[in-house]
Image (tube, rainbow, N blue to C red):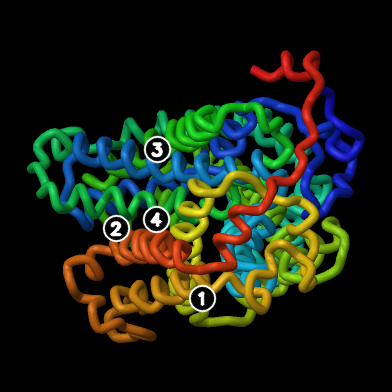
Amino acid sequence: MAASENDRVGSVETRGIEPVPDAERHGHASQMFWTWFAANISILGLPLGAALVSFRGLNIWQAAVVAILGSFGSFALVGALSIAGKRGGAPALTLSRAVFGVRGNAGPTLVTWMSRLGWETINTTTAAFALLALLDAAFGIRRNTVLTVVCLLVFIGCTLLISGLGHATIMWINRWASYVFGLLNLVVIGFLATTVDWGKVFHAPVGPVSSMVVGVGMIAAGTGIGWANTGADYARYLPRRIPGGRLVAASAFGAGIPLVVLISLGSLLAAGEPDLASASDPVSAINTMLPSWMSIPYLIAAFGGLLLSNHLSVYSAGLTMITLGIRVRRTLAVGLDVVVTFAGGIYFILIAKDFYGPFITFLTLLAVPINAWVGVFAVDLILRRSYDGAALMDVGRSSRYWFRGGVAWAAMIAWAAAIVVGLLFTEASTSATDVWFSGPLAHSWIGSNGLGWVVTLVLAAVVYALLRRFDGTVREEASAQPPQQQVLPAPAAREVS
């Protein structure tokens, strides 16, 4: 089926969070491949691989296996959760109203929005540094305050243009930019491969199996888990007839292919550059490993990779802001989002002296409630038959998703319990001497190896699966008559592969 005027490349998407009608659904599962390929072709994946060798003691073959399991597995989860978007036609956090209630959903939505804004600020700041370094390497222009602001504005302007135009333009950009920046990355990767100390690589001892288990969790947490609550945002325009398995496969392979290459290369580089794993500015750390003539394509690739990731995050943040109850058009929500990230970038670069570390620490803490949301939402998706589009947009007492007082207590209790337990295994610190928060189990094997997120997700899923059986309002909603769905005519259905 042809795209509607609302979702055509180059035109502004006017739809907000309201479900997409069947008559306007179009596209193929391959769109999810390019979405997650584009989000993961950044050179910044190298430090993840370096950490497997420097911190976990794995050899290259073990690191490759860990990269495959962690990246493919975590983005298979992203693809599985994106089935909700295909099924309900709405963004992830809007669909979450059906799980937590129209009022209860405010908690997960607020946490998600804050986390998105935070990581967008990190992306913006890092991209500005990359652009400043590019200008210095290419033209000898030294960094100053005015130039720093201009570089921030250039990155934000590019993000605003793509995210503001909306879904169709993002899908188109993701595909074609992946070719361009993917080739640039291959050039840089090819050169970096020539700097590998192969003697150290092939004589590295085998690491313990327990380190591989921890490594899989580390890669999953650093890649797919962070995108798990956005997959539905990009699948909502797809025809509901597309098999869910195709979305899972497209997401897993789209992200897994570039991530495995980058993580494996990072593992190779760590043999000669062990400090790469702990670099506070990985863009600069990798740049120092390159000759001056290679810096230009590298910095362009780094800037492009950050942009491809950031415009996805900004688009989702705009939808999340509207779900939160801020009544603005989607384009204005995107605009407000980039204004906040611009202010954050100014503060990071020009004002703050020691804010970067604490800010990332704060964002790490926000990952605990996000993982708890994933566990609850995943169970609901498995058990749910359908979404009621009208009820998703009704935030009053008449909504099918009002439950009890606007809250689905089974979901809220499971979410809260998982957060509390997850924090027991969490330590938030900027250094060994600057510890913000340390749970009583933070130094247990699970906590010290960064597997608290697994406990959080699994506990949320198990508790919710048990409690929803005893929540009368949830049972009543689940047994309600499914809403009437629009059916695509036969000719359109044949266009779906």
Question: Residue 145: horizontal and vertical position, in percent?
Answer: 70, 72
Q: Earlier in the sequence, mark 2 or mark 1?
A: 2
Q: Which structural element holds mark 1?
A: helix
Q: Nearer the viewer, mark 1 or mark 3?
A: 3
> Crowding at label 1, few (<14), some or many (≥20) Cα neighbours within 10 Å?
some
Mark pair 2, 4: CA separation: 21 Å
Question: Residue 162: horizontal and vertical position, in percent?
Answer: 77, 46
Mark pair 2, 1: CA separation: 22 Å
Residue type (three-letter) at the residue carrying disc 4: Ala
Q: Residue 72, labelled with which disc? A: 3
Residue type (three-letter) at the residue carrying disc 2: Asp
Mark pair 4, 3: CA separation: 12 Å
Q: Which structural element holds mark 4?
A: helix
Please identify the quadrant where the N terminus is shown. top right
Picture quadrant where residue 25 is located: top right
- The residue carrying mark 4 is 221
Q: Is residue 123 visible?
A: yes
Mark pair 4, 1: CA separation: 18 Å
Q: Residue 275, labelled with which disc? A: 2
Q: Are marks 4 and 1 in contact (CB under 8 Å)?
A: no
Q: Nearer the viewer, mark 2 or mark 3?
A: 3
- Horizontal relation, residue 480 to residue 157: left or right: left
Q: Are marks 2 and 4 in contact (CB under 8 Å)?
A: no
Question: Residue 497: horizontal and vertical position, in percent?
Answer: 64, 17
